[in-house]
Amino acid sequence: MATPKRIMVVVDPTAKDHPAVGRAAWLATKMGASLHLSVCDYIQYTAGENMFFDVGVLEATRNDLLKAQEGRLEELAAPLRSQGLEVSVEAHWDYPLHEGILREIEANEPDLVVKDTHYHSAIKRSVFSNTDWNLMRKCPVPLLLVKPIQFGDRISIVAAVDPVHEHDKPARLDHKILDTAQALGALTGGDVHVIHAFDPAGRYVMSAGSMGMAPAIPIEDLVGSLRTQHVEAVDRLMGDYSTISRENIHLLEGEPRELIVDRAATLNADIVILGAVSRGALKRFVMGSTAEQVLDRIPCDLLIVKPDK
């Protein structure tokens, strides 16, 4: 992973606290990067959609709102500049939020995007337009979703890989995840752990042929063979990463989404790195995404990387 030189921070105009700003500043100090603080705002009543309002008055009102947002961004930027960081700010008017953020990313060409993330209710989880999930799918650069936690002096970085590619990921994506984890560990002095989880349940059902038949292969043999396959795949993948201790490689048996969350908590992870692949809407609805399903439950920051184009 090339060291980011320009970090864009998506600032929530409605929030009082901004963990993403602090996390981005910490990273910028480690990486020698500049910061760009960005607010994307939109208020329906000043959008000009009502014919009874004067267009000139609405435009002036929007400009005043954006100036106020830029003033708030300048307040956030001032202490960072006093620390020697290069910080720019910008407030823009756009809707829907995730599309506005994506347009801002395209215009500014950052190497990394950092954003606060909050718990999403069951209702919000059913809405496809959720901002965080849309950014996970569509953000063209690595995306760090920040939780309101404090890092210790030595952070714990967890990279989740899938070398057997059971979840239809490009093979190169695992290397990108590990390269990112290794680079981040070197820059921050953090410990790097690698997780690979596999679930034998699906293979067991396939072996049975149908739910009413006994499996063609004894379950002990089936699970043993599957475990060997995954051990060999992990060994091949990690052959290029000798700096990562074997003790920090975790091969887990069970449902990956559950195990990633549990092991992140056990390892006191500060950052979990996951890969994400854009899929069609129907396939996404049926299958979901590991990153999307762990976002609300993971106890730490989530760094999403995408395969190279």
Image (cartoon, grey):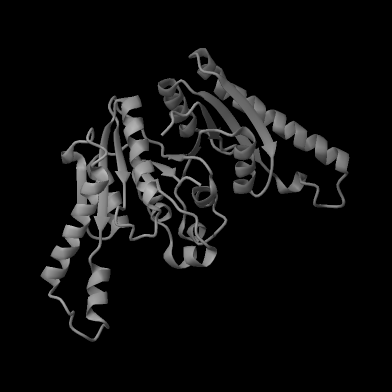
Residue 298, x across and y down, in percent: 35, 47
Q: Residue at 18% of width from left, 83% of height from top?
A: 214
Image position of 132 (left or right of 166): right
As displayed, is residue 165 above or below residue 72? below
Image position of 304 (left or right of 55): left
As displayed, is residue 212 above or below residue 284? below
Q: Quadrant of the N terminus?
A: top left
As displayed, is residue 3 above or below residue 270? above
Residue placed furthest toward the bottom: 212
Residue 266: quarter of image: top left
Q: Residue at 48% of width from left, 39% of height from top?
A: 116
Residue 181: quarter of image: top left
Q: How many marks?
A: 0
Residue 226, x across and y down, in percent: 19, 63
Q: Residue at 33% of width from left, 40% of height from top?
A: 178
Q: Say which of 27 and 41 sits in front.
A: 27
Residue 112, x across and y down, in percent: 49, 35
Q: Residue at 69% of width from left, 29% of height from top?
A: 68
Image position of 224 (left or right of 151): left
Residue 152: quarter of image: top left
Residue 148, x across and y down, in percent: 41, 36
Q: Say which of 149 and 86 sits in front.
A: 86
Image position of 53 (left or right of 68): right
